[in-house]
Image (spheres, grey):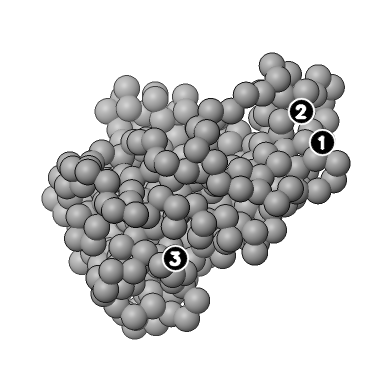
Amino acid sequence: MEKQNIDWANLGFGYIKTDYRYVSNYKNGAWDEGALTTEDTITLNECACVFQYAQTCFEGLKAYTTEDGHIVTFRPDLNAERMINTAKRLEMPPFAKERFLDAITKLVAANAGFVPPYGSGATLYIRPFLFGTNPVIGVKPASEYQFRAFVTPVGPYFKDGAKPITIRVCDFDRAAPHGTGHVKAGLNYAMSLHAIVDAHKQGFDENMYLDAATRTYVEETGGANFIFITKDNTVITPKSDSILPSITRRSILHVAEHYLGLKAEERPVLFEEVKDFAECGLCGTAAVVSPVGKIVDHGKEICFPSGMEKMGPVTQKLYDTLTGIQMGRIEAPEGWIHVIK
C-alpha cells in the first residue's frame, strides 16, 4: 500500500478515518473468528450494557516506521495482557493474547499506507476496545460483546517540544483502594473528566491524584503515571494497587537501569517527598514523557530544579533512549519490538 497523501509534519493528535478496522463478536460463550472491515460505524440497541452500566475497556499503543524502514509496534504483548486483566475485573470475556496480537498485526498491515514515515515525528495510534453489546436493564454483566480495534495517524503530542507543565494537587479521588484504578476501564476516565476540565479552568495542565485512603501518597494523573528523579539521579515511580500498570513506565524503569546505569525504584512515594526531587515527569503512550516543572498544592508551589524551560537532563536521556528503541535507532531488549512488515 502506497503512503497516503497526508501532511505528516503538520499532523495533529486527533482522529482520522483509515481504511480498515478489526471486529470480533462474542456470543453463546465464544468469540467468532473475527475479520477486517471497512465499516466504521457501530449499531447497538438503546439498552446495550455499554450504555447502561459502562461495561467497556480499551488499550492504546502505537505503530512506528523504524530507521531501516520496517513497520513495528512496541511491546503489544503487554497491552494484550493488560486488557485480559481488565476484562476479568469487569466480568467480560477476555480476548486471548494470541488473537489480540494477530488482530493488531493484520490491522496495521492493512492500513500500512497510514503509518507515518520515519523522521516525520508522527505515528500510527492503535485503539483496541471491548464492550458489552446486548440489552441489559438489570444490573449484571452482558452476555454478548464486541472486540474492536481501529488505527489513526497522529502527530507528536507536543507540537512545540516537550515544555514542562504545571499541575495541581487534586481534591478529587481518582480510584478507591479496592476499586478499578489498576485496570484500563472506560469508567476511570469518565470520572476524571470533570477534574481535568476544572484544572484547565484554573490554569493548570493536569491533576496530581493522591491515594484516596490517606491522601498522603502520590498516585497518578487522569491518564499518565509519574516518574521522579532524585538529586542523586535515582529514577523513582510510585507503587500502588490502584495505579494503572503503565507499559511506558515499566519500560522507562528498565531503560534507566539497564541502558543508563541508573538506580531505579518502584515504591510508594509520600507526597511530602516530592519537594525534594530534582525532576518530575508524566509517562504514557501518547507523549512518552511529559516534563513537569511545577506542582501547586492549594497555593503552595513546588518548583523543580530542572525548571520550566525544558526537560531535566535525566528525563531527557530516558526519553531519548526509549524513543530511540521504539524507532529502531537503539537496539531493543528481546521481545520489545513486534515487526509487522
The quadrant holding residue 26 is: top right
First along the sequence among labels 1 and 2? 2
Q: What's the distance in space between the residues labelled 1 and 2, CA to CA?
A: 7 Å
Amino acid type assigned to the residue bearing label 3 in the image:
Ile
The residue carrying mark 3 is: 340
Q: Residue at x 66, y 23 (%)?
A: 44
Q: Residue at x 65, y 64 (%)?
A: 98
Q: Nearer the viewer, mark 3 or mark 1?
A: 3
**In the structure shown, which secondary structural element does the residue marked by tag 1 occupy?**
loop
Amino acid type assigned to the residue bearing label 2 in the image:
Asn
The quadrant holding residue 68 is: bottom left
Residue 246, label in figure? none
Does residue 307 show up? Answer: no
Q: Residue at x 16, y 54 (%)?
A: 310
The residue carrying mark 1 is: 143
Q: What's the distance in space between the residues labelled 2 and 3, CA to CA?
A: 34 Å
The residue carrying mark 2 is: 134
**245 to 190, vertically: above or below:** below
Q: What's the distance in space between the residues labelled 3 and 1, CA to CA?
A: 33 Å
Looking at the image, do the residues carrying marks 1 and 2 touch, with CB atoms under 8 Å apart?
yes
Q: Is 15 in front, or is 239?
A: 15
Q: Which quadrant does the C terminus fall into?
A: bottom left
Residue 226: x and y, percent? 42, 54
Q: Which quadrant does the N terminus fall into?
A: bottom left
Q: Residue at x 54, y 41 (%)?
A: 37
